[in-house]
Amino acid sequence: MEKTHILSILVENEAGVLARVSGLFSARGFNIDSICVAKTLEKNESKMIITTSGDTQILEQITKQLNRLINVIKVQELTDEDSVVRQTVLIKVNADETTKSDIVRIKDIFSGRIIDVSRNSYTLEVTGSERKIESLIDILRPLGIKDIVMTGIVAIQRARKLN
Amino acid sequence: MKPNNERNMMTGSKIIIESLIKEGVDTIFGYPGGAVMNIYDELLNYADKINHVLVRHEQGAAHAADGYARASGKVGVVLVTSGPGATNTITGIATAYMDSIPIVILTGQVPTNLIGNDAFQEADTVGITRPCTKHNYLVKDVKNLARTIKEAFYIASTGRPGPVLIDIPKDITSSVCEFDYPEGIELRSYNPTYFGHHVQISKVVKELLNAKRPLLYIGGGVIISNAAAELKELAELFDLPVTSTLMGLGGFPAEHSLFFGMLGMHGTYAANMAISNADFIIAIGARFDDRVTGKVEEFARNAKFAHIDIDPSSIGKNVKIEIPVVGDVKAVLNSLLEMLSTKSKEISSTQYDRLKWLEDINIWKYEHPLSYEMNDVIKPQYVIEKIYELTEGSAIISTEVGQNQMWAAQFYKFNNPRTFLTSGGLGTMGYGFPAAIGAQIACPEKTVFDIAGDGSIQMNIQELATAVQYNLPVKIAIINNNFLGMIRQWQELFYKKRYSFSEMNVNPDFVKLAEAYGAVGLRATKPNEVEDVIKKALSIKKPVIMDFVVAKEESVYPMVAPGAPITGMLLV
Ligand SMILES: Cc1ncc(C[n+]2csc(CCOP(=O)(O)OP(=O)(O)O)c2C)c(N)n1
Ligand SMILES: [Mg+2]
């Protein structure tokens, strides 16, 4: 069954490592839905969070292939249940006298912030789960979205709960 | 830090050569150019330690290093210039990659400050070779040079081996730094698993003892891991029948009574029937290639599988595996033998079933052996049989690609590992001859044959000059059917004999061609001339081309149509 998977990939921070990882996906016809790369606290390491879709057998192949890359230190699949998954969106939306208060209310509901204001637009910053971001977009769409940018998904494993 | 005069200061060029020597390298296959002039200049100082073989095309260098590695088990080394020098090696690198062959390729690069400027003879070599190397490097600082070379050899030769490329900008080869070759190596993210998991291996033992129709399906991993002796012991211990992929040939003695030949598209009837009827199959260093499985949904449907492989990504890729065992073939077979040594085959309740099973396979073998018909034209199969006979099975055989390759696999009996060199994964025409050159250099005392097609041999024929220059008595047996024979065969079978561009309307006179290069050319046009030509070639200590003018429209059988189940064999 096609399903979205989140892979957390710890890599050595070397030139070309992003190309190696993304090349591996493209060479095998695997699609990358989103990708996020940044350094970690360790000097020579980076963490990539990649979301991809496919059945579990494809995922297993991807994981093994990733492990085969010399610069890949660790590959882990994160699931919705055992990890916190977030995405940030910046949305510039039309705003006039009749809609401004609505936008502010929506922003509050979604625990977002207004980060830029002009005579006829507001820019919102909202962080949340993918689903939350989707519903934000749905709600704002009728007002007229002028521009939108999203980060890839970031995810972290939850600490183990005490019994 | 020590003062400069006490430190071992060297140019990058010298560091490269000293590092190679530390790795035990005594042979380099290469071709000079602007970006590697410094290295070449330094090479002259090492003429007593390093034998540099000047090829005639960089593709030849890569294949020769590959043939050297396959025949010797050592890492093959290539040295070429930037841009076109590097791009010319790509086919050779991809060939080695597909067949897991350890080679290290040193490519020159434009000076660091020009990288990315579309400088003269600049190519993004690391970018181009990323998908066809096990790993690659661009050295940006001379201080990293020695360590990079150390890592490259380590990565190329361990785990599942493969080509590793090091791209070296010209300024690095003239920069000076201290030479201090690292002793050990620590790669945090690269730790191949050598020893199989005990629990998994004991599951194999259990299945094996209960199996009624067991089978060993072996691949190139047996040869790479030098596990032929362990494999033989295992097979003999329990009378296990063995079938091999193209890459595994030589991993088990072809003349052994437990050997039933190659399986797959051009496999024997017995091998394909055996794998289709087995109830427990141990795949050993094989990777379930589509040329082996045929229609994968119907491949070995009645069997449970154990799969021993050092590369976890090979396991369960195409076929569901009940017992995966990740590890080096030799190490795993040793553990398996150890566990089995406490059991004897008498304990096994299925002893009688096993005897019956062997009988069944032998019946298949006698019902449909590999065969061909003789008449007054030379049959390709006959040439190969004669080569086998007259070399007493002790030659190293490389092949090109096509019918010549399949007939070599079917009719030469490979009894020893590292004696059959063929491009299995990529199927590279033009591989065989330069690979034979590399093998001859690795094994000077052996007879080396390239079994060639009239099409393929023209893809790297320029290396005849190399063979002549270095006095390499490589024997080229051209199975000359005046066709791209394998293409013609497919057109005959699947395209209603529409021979679209598969006939070699013009071929050179191969005898004259050999002579033009200063080699020897011989020709046989009738069956009774074959033996004399081979004998004569064997007596000449020079490169020899044998032009065997064979039946034009002979086909390789058995054949499984692509995508069909492997039980659906077209027989002769
Ligand atoms: C570099 C390359 N180009 C094309 C092919 C496709 N191909 C496979 S077999 C073959 C025919 C080979 O002809 P020849 O060398 O005469 O061998 P024969 O089959 O006649 O023995 C071709 C063109 C290939 N394998 N490699
Ligand atoms: Mg031909």
Image (cartoon, coloured by chain):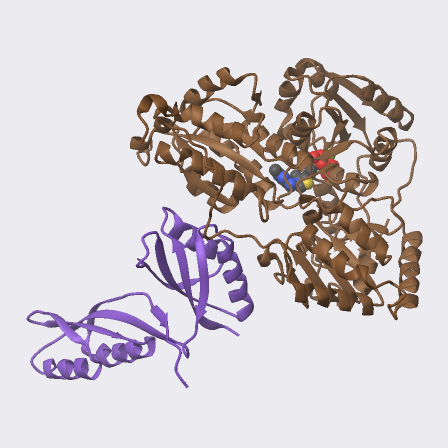
Q: Does the rendering let one see residue B565?
A: no
State the image quarter where residue A114 is shown: bottom left
Q: Is residue B469 left or right of residue B90?
A: right
Q: How many marks?
A: 0
Is B459 placed above or below B249 here? above
Is A89 placed above or below B17 here? below
Q: Name the outermost residue toward the bottom.
A: A163
What is the x, y in percent for residue B7?
Answer: 36, 25
What is the x, y in percent for residue B71?
Answer: 69, 34
**Closer to the camera in the image, B52 or B487:** B52
What is the x, y in percent for residue B540?
Answer: 79, 17
Instruction: Look at the image and tell me in which quarter the N terminus of chain B lies.
Output: top left
Q: Residue at x 82, y 47 (%)?
A: B557
Is B543 placed above or below A1 here? above
- Shown in brown, the chain is B
Q: Residue at x 71, y 30 (%)?
A: B454
Is B259 placed above or below B344 here? above
What is the x, y in percent for residue B220?
Answer: 69, 47
**Closer to the camera in the image, B298 or B393:** B393
State the image quarter where residue B515 is shown: top right
Q: Does the rendering let one see residue B534?
A: yes
Chain A visual colour: purple
Q: Which quarter of the frame holds ligand 1? A: top right
**Closer to the camera in the image, B281 or B408:** B281
